[in-house]
Amino acid sequence: DAGVTQSPTHLIKTRGQQVTLRCSPISGHKSVSWYQQVLGQGPQFIFQYYEKEERGRGNFPDRFSARQFPNYSSELNVNALLLGDSALYLCASSLRERGLETQYFGPGTRLLVL
Amino acid sequence: TQLLEQSPQFLSIQEGENLTVYCNSSSVFSSLQWYRQEPGEGPVLLVTVVTGGEVKKLKRLTFQFGDARKDSSLHITAAQPGDTGLYLCAGRRNAGGTSYGKLTFGQGTILTVHP
C-alpha cells in the first residue's frame, strides 16, 4: 500500500507570495495533520482535520489555512510568505482505533522563501 | 518553553557502544511515540507506549514509559552506523481515556554512529 504522499517535494517562493501544499493520506485514514519543521527543531503542529472538519489548530497566524476534501486529501495554504516560513512541511495521516491515534508522516515539502 | 525536553541534543559515538536518549516533561501524557528521521525525509514511527511503566523492545532498541507517564527513554544496544539519524519523542495530552489529536514533539536528538 502507498504511504502518505505530498507534493511538491521542493518549492522556492519569494516574500509576499502564496503557496499551496498538497497531501494524500494512506488509504482508509480519515485524519490529516500538518506540521512545520524548522531546521534543527522538532515538528510544530499547525492543523488537524478529521472527517473533513478542523479538529485542532496550533499557534500559527491566520496566514496559514487548510482544508480537507471528501476523499480525505488535504491542502495547506500559506499567504503573504515570510522568510521565516522556510521549513519542511510535514503531513501526517492517521487512523483512530480503540482510543489511540497513530500518525504516519509523509516525506514532506521543503519550502524556501527568498 | 519546550513541553517535552529531550537530552542529549547531540550524541556522537563509536559503533558497538550503547546509548540512552531521554524525553522528560512536567506534564502527564496519554501516549508517547518515538520517531526516527533521516535528512530530507519525514519521521518514521518506531514505537507507541501508552501504559505507565511499559517497556517495549524493537530488536536492539528498548523503549520505556515512566510510571507517571511524564517521561520516556530510548536505549540502543550495540549501536550501528545505520542507527544514525534524528530521534524524536512526541506525546499527546488527553483526558477521558483516549489519545487523539495533535502531537507535541521534543526538539530531537541527533545521533551519529561512527564505524
Image (cartoon, coloured by chain):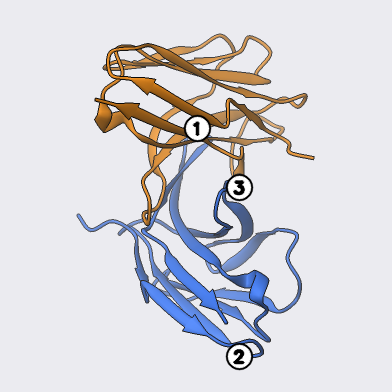
Chain colours: A blue, B orange
Question: What residue is drawn where x is 36% and y is 59%?
Answer: A107
Mark 3 highlights which residue?
A: B101
Q: CA distance from mark 1 to mark 3?
A: 13 Å
In the image, residue A62 lies at what x, y percent? 75, 76
Residue hosting label 2: A17
Q: Position of residue A96 (x, y in %)?
A: 48, 44
Chain for numbered disc 1: B
Which mark's residue is nearer the viewer, 2 or 1?
2
Q: Residues within 10 Å of mark 3 (few under 14, many from 20)?
A: many
Q: Position of residue A80 (x, y in %)?
A: 68, 86
Residue A61 lies, with reference to residue B71, above or below; the image says below
Q: Nearer the viewer, residue B3 or A52?
A: B3
Q: Amino acid at mark 3?
A: Gly
Secondary-structure class at tag 1: strand
| Label 2 environment density (alpha carbons within 10 Å; few <14, some 14–19, many ≥20) | few
For image coordinates 77% across by 24% down, the residue present is B26
- Per the image, the residue denoted by label 1 is B33
Classify mark 2: helix, strand or loop: loop
**Residue A110 falls in which quadrant of the image?**
bottom left
Residue type, numbered disc 1: Gln
Residue at far left of view: A1
The image shows residue A50, relative to residue A8, as above or below, that is above
User: Which amino acid is tagged 2?
Assistant: Gln
Q: Return the x and y of residue A31 as percentages of the image width and height.
A: 49, 58
Q: How many marks?
A: 3
Residue ID at (63%, 9%) = B67
